[in-house]
Amino acid sequence: MDYEKRSDKMYKAEFCEVNYEEKQDVVLMINFAYLDKDAFDAVAFRIFNILADNMEIIAPTGNEREEDYNCWYNGVSDALKRNERQIILIKDADSIIGFFQYYTTEDTFMMEEVQLKTCYHGKNIFRKLYGFIIENIGKDLRFVEAYANVSNFKSIGILERMGLSKIGMNKNGRSVHFKGSYGELLKWYKSK
């Protein structure tokens, strides 16, 4: 659900305008754009709430949403100060429907966060996103890494199909750490 900030409170707004499960003839106008880091404050609520809505289903924190937002906002805004940190906005026409957060090092593509409104799941957007990413990130990458919440079986399955292997857990034990070769990611992308 999208939220708007009014008097330091968050209010729910409608999540998806169209039920895509019922309307098979809807034409999606999906596009991807790198976030202008100076515009982060303007979109932070919208993209956080996509994340929060998804996490309420997968792994609720038990915190108030505003508390989670403040923690997330501080971490992401600090991270975006680094050149290698990027956010790609996923849009249907002009409406933000998701985002992908990542960074690269000399030889590694670190997939940090990919979130999509649930009504857009199963629409082949994920593979199209990776086409956009592959066209726009460094060509000298050798490795891919990611984390998935232990309760997020869908993400775990996707990462495994992409050729990544479980190599451990994060420090708090709530996320599985994955690693694989960038070549395997390319092979997955080209496989369909």
Image: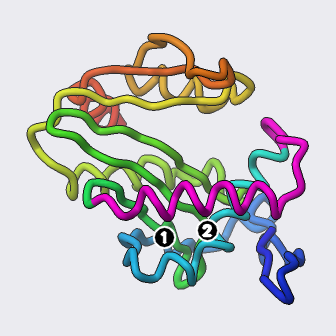
Quadrant where the image shows the N terminus = bottom right
Relative to residue 77, is residue 157 depicted above or below? Answer: above
Write down the residue under mark 2: 97
Q: Amino acid at mark 1?
A: Ile
Q: Main secondary structure of the magenta part?
A: helix
Q: How many marks?
A: 2
**How many angstroms separate mark 1 from mark 2 (CA)?**
9 Å
Q: What element does badge 1 sit on?
A: strand
Crowdedness near tag 1: few (<14), some (14–19) or many (≥20) residues, C-alpha within 10 Å: some
Q: Whole-percent x and y of residue 45?
A: 68, 73
> In the rendered structure, does residue 69 fall within the stretch colored magenta?
yes
Q: Which residues are magenta?
A: 57-82
Instruction: Specify the farthest residue to the left.
Output: 140
Quadrant where the image shows the C terminus = top left
| Residue located 87% across and 78% down the image | 9
Q: Amino acid at mark 2?
A: Ile
Write down the residue under mark 1: 30
Q: Whole-percent x and y of residue 5?
A: 78, 83
Specify the quadrant of the image occupied by residue 25.
Answer: bottom right
> In the rendered structure, does residue 143 fall within the stretch colored magenta?
no
| Residue located 42% across and 47% down the image | 127
105 with respect to 139 (left or right): right
In-front residue for pair 96/107: 107
- Of mark 1 and mark 2, the one earlier in the sequence is 1
- Labels 1 & 2 near each other (Cβ < 8 A): yes
Q: Whole-percent x and y of residue 89?
A: 47, 68
Check residue 113 in the rendering and tell me which mark sits there, or answer none.
none
Relative to residue 61, is residue 184 depicted above or below? Answer: above
| Residue located 40% across and 69% down the image | 32
